[in-house]
Image (spheres, rainbow, N blue to C red):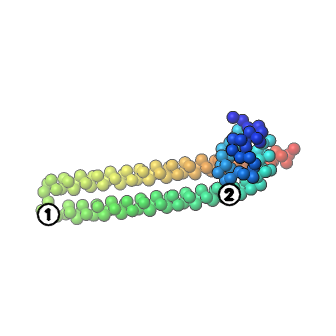
Amino acid sequence: MRYDSEEQLKKKLKIDSWRNLSKEKFLDYIALIPNVSEEIQLKVLENLPECLSFTKDLTETMKFQLEKIVDENSNTTSSVIKSLDAIQKSLDSFGSKPELSNEDLRYIIDKQMELAKMYIELSKDDKEFLDKIWSGVVTFGVVVLLFIGAILGLKKNDNET
């Protein structure tokens, strides 16, 4: 839907006044920008001098949250690796005993193969996790850049007229 009036846009955002535009609603507005006429975008900017402040706050919040998520994931991964390493050492020490039967050795080898699969799976999960995080960062970055570009483009057009 194309938004050609402030009232249409405010109705979509479920606000009565631009003063009621929270950071959450601001994110909704950013998503709507491609469907908002330039005239309305300018009016919104006139009513929201804190738009750049919102954008800066959102960027800082996203950065903090991403750092926190990556750190937590890294700590979790490290803990899992330490646990797997401890199991591997136990299997190694048990497997070095000379009195083991062929069945015992086969069992240890099977468990070591299971551990190897767990390491591979952990590595795959970690990579997928990071891919999802970076995909979200890129999407967020594009949205912010589009918003800033829209602001600068509108201000430039406004100054030229």
Q: CA distance from mark 2 to mark 1?
A: 65 Å
State left or right for residue 156 relative to residue 129: right
Give how far across and how far down residue 66 sits, in percent.
Answer: 55, 57
Any mark on residue 98, and which? 1
Tally of marks: 2
Label 2: few (<14), some or many (≥20) within 10 Å?
A: few
Q: Quadrant of the N terminus?
A: top right
Give how far across and how far down residue 5 sits, in percent.
Answer: 77, 39
Q: Amino acid at mark 1?
A: Pro
Counting residues from the start of the chain, the first of labels 2 and 1 encountered is 2
Farthest residue in the front direction?
A: 16
Label 1: few (<14), some or many (≥20) within 10 Å?
A: few
Q: Which residue is mark 2?
A: 56
2 or 1: mark nearer the eye:
2
State left or right for residue 63 relative to residue 149: left
Which residue is depicted at the point 34% across and 62% down?
Answer: 83
Note whether residue 145 is visible: no
Farthest residue in the top direction?
A: 1
Farthest residue in the right direction?
A: 161
Secondary structure at numbered mark 1:
loop
State left or right for residue 134 relative to residue 3: left
Q: Quadrant of residue 88?
A: bottom left
Contact (Cβ within 8 Å) of mark 2 with mark 1: no
Any mark on residue 115, and which? none
Q: Amino acid at mark 2?
A: Lys
Secondary structure at numbered mark 2:
helix
In front of the other: 32 or 98 = 32
Which residue is depicted at the point 37% across and 59% down?
Answer: 80
Note whether residue 28 is visible: yes
Give how far across and how far down residue 2 sits, in percent.
Answer: 72, 35
Q: Quadrant of the C terminus?
A: top right
